[in-house]
Image (cartoon, helix red, strand yellow):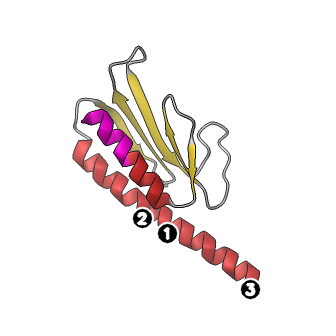
C-alpha cells in the first residue's frame, strides 16, 4: 500500500509539474503568437503537447520545437518523463518539466532574437 501511495504521489507531482510547465508556454504564445516568423504555435487541447514552427534562414526554411509527454519519434510514454524536441537535434528527456520548458523557451527565444 505504501509503495502504491508513493508511486501515485510521484505521478501526481509530475502531472502537476507538467501542468505548471504549460503555463510559461502559454505565456510565450501570447507574446510571440503574432510574430510573422511564427508559422504556428499549438497547445494541444489536452495540454499534453506543445508544438511551435518558426521560419528560419536554412535550406529547410523552418524549425520545429515541441514539448510532450510522448517520445517525439517513438511516440511512447514513460511515466515521469517529459520530452523536448528541436529540428536537427536528438530529443531530450527531462524528469523535471520546469527544466524542459526553460530550455524550450530559451531555444525559441534564441531563434527569434
**Chain part drawn in magenta:** 105-113
Contact between labelled residues 3 and 1, with CB atoms less than 8 Å apart = no
Contact between labelled residues 1 and 2, with CB atoms less than 8 Å apart = yes
Q: Image quadrant for the N terminus? A: bottom right
Query: Which of marks 3 and 1 precedes in the sequence?
Result: 3
Q: Secondary structure at mark 3?
A: helix
Is 13 colored magenta in this rendering? Answer: no
For residue 20, the mark is: 2
Query: Which of marks 3 and 2 precedes in the sequence?
Result: 3
Above or below for 61 versus 16: above
Q: Separation of disc 2 and disc 3 at Cα?
A: 27 Å
Q: Position of residue 58 (x, y in %)?
A: 38, 18
For residue 16, the mark is: 1
Please name the residue that numbered disc 3 is placed on: 2
Report the front residue among 50 and 107: 107
Q: Position of residue 27 (x, y in %)?
A: 29, 54
Q: Separation of disc 1 and disc 3 at Cα?
A: 21 Å
Amino acid at each position: 500500500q505504501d509503495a502504491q501511495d508513493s508511486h501515485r504521489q510521484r505521478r501526481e507531482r509530475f502531472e502537476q509539474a507538467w501542468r505548471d510547465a504549460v503555463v510559461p508556454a502559454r505565456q510565450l504564445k501570447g507574446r510571440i503568437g503574432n510574430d510573422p516568423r511564427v508559422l504556428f504555435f499549438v497547445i494541444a487541447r489536452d495540454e499534453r503537447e506543445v508544438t511551435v514552427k518558426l521560419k528560419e534562414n536554412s535550406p529547410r526554411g523552418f524549425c520545429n520545437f515541441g514539448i510532450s509527454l510522448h517520445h517525439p519519434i517513438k511516440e511512447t510514454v514513460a511515466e515521469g518523463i517529459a520530452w523536448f524536441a528541436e529540428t536537427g537535434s536528438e530529443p531530450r528527456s527531462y524528469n523535471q518539466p520546469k527544466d524542459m520548458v526553460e530550455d524550450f523557451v530559451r531555444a525559441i527565444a534564441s531563434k527569434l532574437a
